[in-house]
Image (tube, grey):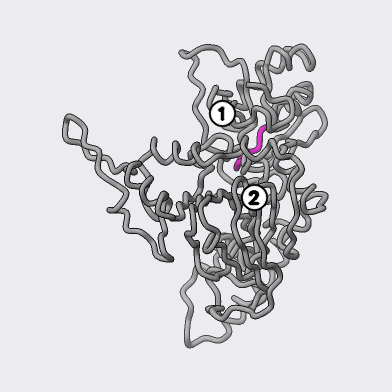
Amino acid sequence: MEHRLINAIEGALGWKGAEQVGKAFVCGRCDDTGLLSRVLTPNRLLDIAMRRSLNRPQFRVFQKGEEVHPAVYVTDTVSPRGQSIPMVNMHRLGRLLDEGATLILDQLNVFDPTMEVACRALQWWSHERVQVNAYLTTNEASGFPLHWDDHDVMVVQLAGEKKWQVRETTRTAPMYRDADPNSIPSDTVLFDGVLQAGDIMHIPRGHWHQATRAEKGSGYSLHVTFGITKRTGASWLAWLGDWCREHEVFRHDLDRQHAAGHASLMEAAARLVVERPPADFLTAYEHNTAPGRHVPFLGIFGPLDTVVCSTHFPPQIHTIGNTVHVITAGKRLTLAAKALPAIRVLLSGEPIVLDEAAAVVGAEAYDVAEILVKEDLCAPLTDELSSGYTGLVTNAVC
């Protein structure tokens, strides 16, 4: 899947592929200025907030360095039958933003097709889980105080400007669950400047940073941060903890009186480490990730005519003799080898019109598409989902 946002990131940061994610702080500028408003605008963000029932901590507002209590900008909408649904009061929210505030919406990819597709593309690119948060700051409001994140961050400044400071780490590869609180910031500043629309910044895990519009006067800033959570050695050990239950020796109670039993346990643990190395964990993580969310296909609404692969990671396709095997989303599908051309097209990550695919790879495209949709590897391309691809993914047209 080729996505304009990924091309912009690689161009701005001087990367070729995702190998540099998490390696070092870097900042650059995107030449594709038309991309910015296509990804997100302030009004589209506010429209998303208006049409959904959002609650903290997913939706938050900060003013004067402190979080605003939701009761200030959230009110209950009561239906004629007395059903109460909390909704953002846009009049109150507008007043806060007019005074100067920061609005934060976490996991925007859950609500917006464009962000959903962008995160999926970044996951196919990086082979890691990705979510996106949006930050709208008005006038002279500040954001979070100096802090560090337990994941790598890709900051894309979409509109306006905001002052950033980035500092070195004070603990190598800090984690959310860690043996050290890592609470003292570094004095070494790597970046102290203003991001303007089109600037892209990669902040590796553990780097201290903060952003603000203090002393910037009237205006606003809109940026999104793509959080890329990479797997660690601790993740591998946790995975081994699940696999150990296959062996009886790990299921027995620990006996405080018999050291010989402990020795057997340690020997079994050493064998398990060899049996299931980190490479197996990395592969299993992608293969076993559950299917992505999508609208189900219902034949009563009409025929299946356009589909797109909706897996979190690119499916693995292998041919063995007269069969082709597809491994992804916790499944392993086996089809006849003649289905291979259709499989490659349908699982490319790009929206596929079945009539057009059939003209190229044969009539098998229809049957294979039905199988892939039934198994949740592909999704029907609704108008809403299509909007997330249009103009951003190669060959995608609404």
Location of residue 158 with respect to 323 vertically, above or below: below
- Residue at 72% x, 12% y: name it: 363
Identify the residue at horizontal 41%, vertical 49% (top origin): 98
Q: Earlier in the sequence, mark 2 or mark 1?
A: 2
Inspect the magenta stretch and tell me whether residue 241 lies in it: no
Q: Is residue 200 left or right of residue 52?
A: right
- Element at badge 1? helix
Image quadrant assignment for residue 335: top right
Left or right, 13 with reference to 287 = right
- Distance between the Cα atoms at labels 2 and 1? 22 Å
Is residue 332 shown in magenta? Answer: yes
Q: Which residue is mark 2?
A: 156
Q: Residue at x 43, y 55 (%)?
A: 100
Crowding near the residue tagged with mark 2, few <14, some 14–19, many ≥20 C-alpha atoms within 10 Å: many
| x and y, in percent, of residue 68 in the image | 35, 59
Residue lying farthest to the front in this orientation: 217
Task: Give how far across and how far down residue 29 sits, in percent.
Answer: 75, 50
From the image, state whether disc 2 or disc 1 is nearer to you.
2
Secondary structure mainly formed by the magenta segment: strand
Q: Is residue 264 above or below residue 110?
A: below
The answer to whether residue 316 is above or below residue 55 is above
Residue 219 visible in the picture = yes
The boundaries of the magenta stretch are 329-333
The answer to whether residue 244 shows anywhere in this view is no
What type is the residue that disc 2 sits on? Val
> Which type of secondary structure does the marked residue at label 2 adopt?
strand
Q: Which residue is mark 1?
A: 385
Residue 206 vs residue 357, the one in the foreground: 206
Q: Nearer the viewer, residue 380 or 142?
A: 142
* Amino acid marked by disc 1: Leu
